[in-house]
């Protein structure tokens, strides 16, 4: 395998977490959890940097999703989990001032719920073909997660 492809596989598979034998999307979300766990504990990281990190990962996800479709010869390769990482980062960015280990865990499970259930609009994108749609179905699931977290916080349930 060419070095260029190894780097793309590494990124696309969420640092190889996407090769988990089952639930690759769930395992693929773990790197984002770890990244934000490191950020909140060891890095002086501002909200603006969090937005920039999300945008970088979003652009990488769109690029790598199109590459992954060709590389793995599949319209929605299960190894490709960079979209999960990107979506998790979007949620974490929305709640940047409240991030803690407990909150990161809440984000993880709420996002995984919506990503598995695929509510309307997310399901629409999930059925379409193309790299951007692979990413957008997770972004929509992230938006459902954000709204749910706001509601849970409003009623002091989170």
Image (cartoon, grey):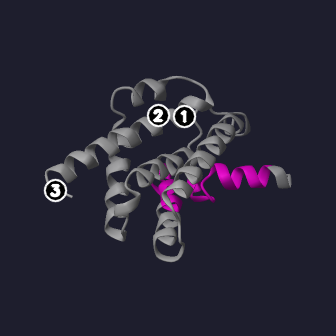
On the picture, is 19 further left or further right than 96? right
Return the residue nearer the eye: 123 or 21. 123
Q: CA distance from mark 3 to mark 1?
A: 31 Å
- Labelled disc at residue 137: 2
Return the residue nearer the eye: 25 or 154. 154
Q: Is residue 17 magenta?
A: yes
Q: Is residue 53 magenta?
A: no
x 42%, y 55%: residue: 92
Quarter where residue 129 is shown: top right
**Residue highlighted by disc 1:** 134
**Residue highlighted by disc 3:** 157
Q: Is residue 131 above or below residue 4?
A: above
x 29%, y 41%: residue: 147
On the picture, is 51 further left or further right than 65? left
Quarter where residue 117 is shown: top left
The magenta segment is: 5-32
């Amino acid at each position: 395998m060419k070095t260029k492809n190894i780097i793309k596989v590494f990124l696309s598979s969420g640092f190889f977490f996407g090769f988990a034998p089952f639930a690759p999307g769930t395992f693929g979300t773990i790197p984002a959890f770890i990244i934000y766990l490191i950020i909140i504990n060891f890095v002086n990281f501002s909200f603006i940097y969090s937005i920039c990190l999300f945008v970088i990962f979003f652009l990488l996800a769109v690029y790598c999703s199109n590459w992954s479709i060709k590389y793995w010869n599949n319209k929605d390769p299960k190894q490709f989990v960079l979209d999960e990482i990107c979506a998790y980062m979007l949620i974490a960015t929305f709640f940047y001032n409240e991030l803690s280990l407990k909150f990161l865990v809440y984000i993880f499970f709420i996002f995984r719920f919506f990503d598995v259930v695929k509510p309307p609009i997310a399901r629409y994108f999930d059925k379409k073909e193309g790299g951007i749609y692979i990413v957008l179905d997770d972004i929509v699931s992230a938006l459902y997660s954000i709204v749910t977290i706001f509601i849970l916080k409003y009623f002091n349930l989170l």
